[in-house]
Amino acid sequence: MRRPGLAAAIVATLLPGPVGADALAGQSVQQPTNWTAILMFAAFALLTLGITRRAAQRTRTVGDFYTAGGGITGFQNGLAIAGDFMSAASFLGISAQIFADGYDGLIYSIGFLVGWPIILFLMAERLRNLGRYTFADVASFRFAQAPVRSFAAVSTLTVVLFYLIAQMVGAGQLIKLLFGLRYEYAVVIVGVLMTLYVLFGGMTATTWVQIVKAVLLLGSATFMALVVLWQFGFSFEALFARAVAVKSGLAAAAGADPAEAAARGRSIMGPGNFIKDPVSAVSFGLALMFGTAGLPHILMRFFTVPDARAARKSVLWATGWIGYFYLLTFIIGFGAIVLVATAPRYLDPAGGLLGGGNMAAIHLAHAVGGDLFLGFISAVAFATILAVVAGLTLSGASAISHDLYATVLRRGAADPAAELRVSRRTVLVLAVVAILLGIIFEKQNVAFMVSLAFAVAASGNFPVLLLSLFWKGCTTRGVVAGGTLGLVLAVVLTVLSPAVWEKILDYPAAIFPYSSPAIFSMPAAFLTIWLVSLLDRSGRAAVDRGGYPAQQVRAETGIGAARASSH
Amino acid sequence: MDDAEAARVAADPRYRELVRRRELFTWTLTAVMLIAYLSFILLIAFDKALLARPIGAGVTSVGIVAGFAVIVLAIVLTAIYVRGAARDFDPLVEAVRAEHDA
């Protein structure tokens, strides 16, 4: 059904793990220039630049820049988190996977969602009470600042850079396909807009870009799902039955005998070849679940609200919106089977989707709303990437300016104006690096990068945060040793896994045969932190352990926590 | 906040009750979510046929219901925590703060 290559590239670049590892067999083909989409996107750019202009007038202090002065409400933050999290991968990639294989797409959606309750139960309120700008504030709260901050900054930059490259390459491929513009233009447009948002509007502008994008994406996906369901009298069973019939019919037309055709039709109702071995299944599940709870740009969002209560509410809103969005994606994927796979105008002579496997949702947009809605959806898909990269860049910049410059280099005595200056310069540097890497990696298979980012977050940041929050015996040495081991293992095992070893380096058999390292690297990090802390007899270790009661009091009650700045 | 202040808060019975109750609540909900999700993943790993089985006479499978049940569970647990925290923990936090956070 799915033609290899073409825009499978985008699924490959944006989705972590097995789907993404599907190989970047080819590049997306540049389409005729789509002026409707370009005009709609220009309108989005103008709107968000207007917001940035207003935000810039309110962005004066370091706190305004990093966390919008802590003045975002729980509801707004929930939408912004959803906007930060619902990537083009979720929308195009998951609906395309459901279009191709049915049920398997749902497995991804669930993995992405279940991290949120964990964040709420274990972290959200405590993060807000202990930290000000970065998750390193929390991870290093009672420890020696320089080593823990340095680890956190390295791990933040690792996550941010890999995630950023994947988004940039995804943006370039998407824009070639949807707008009919050159790859390099797309990468530069994304880089420049994101720089403007972050540089001038800081967290306020970034938050509002994410909110606008979340509303647009949720609104248009709702419209598509409603039109699809309406055609089936709002009966899921009728929609599924028709999709099974369509898949059976296609299999029969391709030469399968009736029994096999019926089996292939039914196969979209259950798990297929998505997860091959149990170890990969569990490992991948762990990386998705706990990676979410360790992504620095997501954790940073909890410092934008006034207090722990608002932090709590933001997770409830975010989980609700994200869960609702995955329900829509599921309906859209099945809608595409029914409405797109049977319409010759969306298919190439070989029976594949025009423009590649990733176009399922895009073609469905045309099927339900014509040229105008197609342009709108294309613009929304591009806007989606912008919102994600803006959050990533701000998080990367704060790791350099707040963790490395202000805390490690200036030992916490940096002039706030100087810190802000360093942060803004870092944004510029990150933007240039992202644009250059985006162009360099155009023809590379970057599928592994997002899954690597999740694995690093789950194996480095998450164990460090969890144990520093909940275990009194945890020490500086333990955190640095365990966190670093988790980070390094996640990177090394990913390089040795099939996605990199076989598909990029072209070696025959991967040394590490599983699709995700998390099942090994995460427990290794936990064990190392535990063991090293236990054996740590240094003077610093006594200070670390002695600091726990004060940390816990502040984490639980918020006494002494940073307040929202007044506007 | 210095260590002496922290020790005074830590000795407050309301604070101790807050920590004890919140930890129980937190880890219970975490365990429910983990068990539900890992069971789902293990079913995918070891018993794909069960998930693919249709419910009744239609085509809708056990797996679709199970998958959406995990999604709904995630949202419901989140809501339970937010409500429980507002009802049980916020008053305790307020009381402790009123006493110690001048």
Image: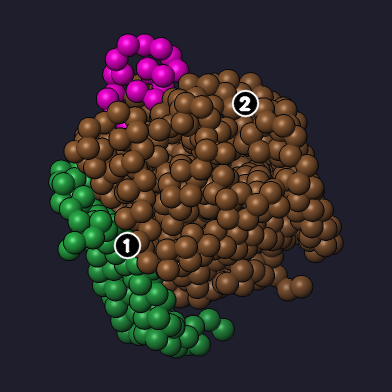
Chain colours: A brown, B green
Please state the chain letter of the residue tagged with numbered disc 2 in the rendered image: A
Front residue (pair A245, A302): A245
Q: Residue at x 34, y 30 (%)?
A: A254
Q: CA distance from mark 2 to mark 1?
A: 37 Å
The percent position of residue A452, horizontal first and vertical second, equals 44, 34
Within 10 angstroms of label 2, few (less than 14), some, or many (20 or more) residues?
some
- Residue position marked by numbered label 2 in the rendering: A29
The quarter of the rendered structure image containing the C terminus of chain A is bottom right
Q: Which numbered circle lies on residue A237? A: 1
At label 1, which amino acid type do we have?
Glu
* Magenta highlight range: A498-516
In the rendered view, does B28 fall on the left or right side of A49? left
Is label 2 in a helix, a strand or a loop? loop
Q: Is residue A235 above or below residue A40?
A: below
Instruction: Give the mark nearer the N terminus: 2 vs 1.
Output: 2
Q: Nearer the viewer, residue A328 or A140?
A: A328
> Is there a contact, CB below 8 Å, between mark 2 and mark 1?
no
Q: Is residue A26 visible?
A: yes
